[in-house]
Image (cartoon, grey):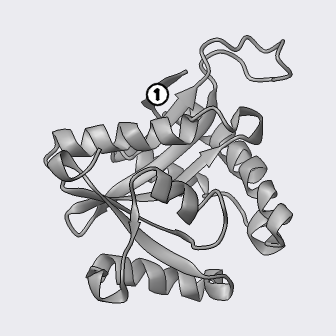
Amino acid sequence: MQIRAGAERDLRRLQDIERAAGGVFREVGMDRIADDAPPPLPVLRRYAHHGGLWVAVDVAAGGEGEGTDFASDQPVAYVMAEPVDGNIHIEQVSVHPRSAHRRIGRALIGHVARQAEAAGVRALTLCTFAEVPWNAPYYERCGFRVLADGELTPGLRRIRAEEAHAGLDRWPRVCMRRELGAGGV
């Protein structure tokens, strides 16, 4: 597996990954999330253009074998991230279910962390579902901690308001932070 910058040729594949990854939310009764549309192409393009879109590609895949239809250099997962209040905010991490449980999401987060650290950024942030096993509990294992309401920056408050407006607050959500540099791994 390699991580590279997301490119125009990847964008439709990323939408497919998002649809497939969203499907697992049905397992926990979150059909509305499972049915949610993937990020529109203009949004994905904006992240790619601003250097905030990375993809994990399975360079060993050749389109056959091991039950996968992925071709070499085709994304199997992606992460979108952007600056928010001096930190790097992870907007989305999605791994195709056929590539799950291979630590690809963790590798993408690690890549974002290294990029942020090299740029002198102090922390990563994200917003996620509190009670979904592959959301907040997973991110805690990746070194994130839940932020108290008083710790939310103006940008995180804005993001949470947008999420609430979109109906995501039907299920408990939290903002999380991972320190970088000496404070984080």
Q: Nearer the viewer, residue 145 or 123?
A: 145
Q: Residue at x 54, y 31 (%)?
A: 56
Relative horizontal placement of residue 181, taking residue 98 as reference (left or right): left
Q: Quadrant of the N terminus?
A: top right
Image vertical order of residue 106 relative to residue 27, above or below: above
Image vertical order of residue 89 relative to residue 149, above or below: above
Image vertical order of residue 178 relative to residue 127, above or below: above
Q: Nearer the viewer, residue 160 or 9?
A: 160
Relative horizontal placement of residue 119, taking residue 141 as reference (left or right): left
User: Mark 1: which amino acid?
Assistant: Ile
Residue that label 1 marks: 3
Q: Estimate the x, y position of residue 87 in percent, counting from the top left.
A: 25, 61
The answer to whether residue 1 is visible is yes
Q: Residue at x 77, y 34 (%)?
A: 98
Q: Nearer the viewer, residue 11 or 150?
A: 150
Query: In the rendered image, which quarter is residue 48 located in?
Result: top left
Q: Estimate the x, y position of residue 67 in percent, counting from the top left.
A: 86, 22
Query: In the rendered image, which quarter is residue 78 located in?
Result: top right
**SS assignment at label 1:** strand
Query: In the rendered image, which quarter is residue 97 located in?
Result: top right
Q: Quadrant of the C terminus?
A: top left
Q: Residue at x 59, y 14 (%)?
A: 59
Q: Residue at x 54, y 50 (%)?
A: 93
Relative horizontal placement of residue 19, taking residue 103 as reference (left or right): right
